[in-house]
Image (tube, helix red, strand yellow):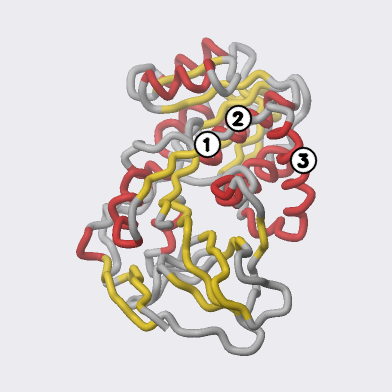
Amino acid sequence: MGNNRQIRLAARPRGEVKPGDWAHVTVDAGAPGDGQFAGRTLLISLDPAMRGWLDDRPSYLPPVGIDEVMRAGTLVEVTESKHPDYAVGDFVVGTFGVQEHVVSDGRGALKVDKPLPTYLGALGMPGMTAYFGLLEVGALKEGETVVVSGAAGAVGSVVGQIAKVKGCRVIGIAGGPEKTALLTDELGFDVGIDYRADDVRKAIRAAAPDGVDVYFDNVGGDILDAALANLAMHGRVVICGAISQYNADEPVPGPSNYLSLLVRRGRMEGFIVFDYVKRYPEAAAELAAWIAEGRIVLKEHVVKGTVDDFPATLTMLFRGENVGKLVLDVS
């Protein structure tokens, strides 16, 4: 059967996740029974939502349990199969966790083709999040002005490009001159704002003097407040995430500029991409067409290593070190 290296949660993090919060263990890999397949992990998805999964509090998914394999979307290659729908050599995406080998009955799994990292990014959960968050929750209309934070990340980079496909003016907020240049030079955004160097509130006002129709929020905190202060009449705020707050020891403060929603007759709505799971094929087909046409440029940050490199790679997300979708290649 061989050995299976796993990363398990050893302790609930307080603030930033530390090396001691993880356990690196080796167990038997196991073998598939009837109706199951075995696979070896090739790629592991790194997502900001992982930080929330480590806290023992009510959320849209149960927290990862102590001594449980860390939850993660992964891509595996089938190595042995007793399942009628999966053959040796198939590539499969699923929530198989941070481990070298998996045994699965196929529930929640999806066979995919190359290029493989795309199925963890633009054609995976980040792409679905961008698509439904912007078009359904944000109710985007042609000609509107869109602002997206975390714009150089896996979700934000796709949000901005979808908005351009839909004929909108797009302003992206990211950290550092390299990322802001990427937004305008490679991804087609109209304006890039560097939150580390610019006064974000003033920069949004200068770039969108008539106000922001849709603000897609990935970071929360002061940047959310800056966007609220610049809402257009009937503006919509899409709450996707709040990465700036995930490692906070204290409760997350509410936005101080929330009364802009009243004055501007706006609305602010959170969403979870899993609510749209039955419509994933619709989104994937449209996204794939835009990628094939060159209207969406893929940005994938692939780190080569082993399963044991997962904890260090995860911290890259919260230090803003990744550009586009962050993937750990353990093949």
Earlier in the chain: of badge 2 and badge 1, it is 1
Which amino acid lies under the numbered mark 2 shown in the image of this protein? Val
Please report the residue visible at 55 percent of the width from the left and 84 percent of the height from the top: 32
Residue 143 % position (x, y): 75, 19
**Mark number, residue 286:** 3
Earlier in the chain: of badge 2 and badge 3, it is 3
- Residue at mark 3 to residue at mark 1: CA–CA distance: 34 Å
**Vertical position of residue 144 compared to residue 38: above or below:** above
Say which of 15 and 39 sits in front: 39
Q: Are marks 2 and 3 in contact (CB under 8 Å)?
A: no
Check disc 1 and report the residue beneath it. Answer: 258
The quarter of the picture where the C terminus appears is bottom left
Disc 1 secondary structure class: loop
**Mark number, residue 179:** none
Please report the residue visible at 35 percent of the width from the left and 53 percent of the height from the top: 251
Query: Which tag is nearer the camera, tag 3 or tag 1?
Result: 3
Earlier in the chain: of badge 3 and badge 1, it is 1
Say which of 20 and 85 sits in front: 85
Q: Are marks 2 and 1 in contact (CB under 8 Å)?
A: no
Q: Is residue 259 visible?
A: no
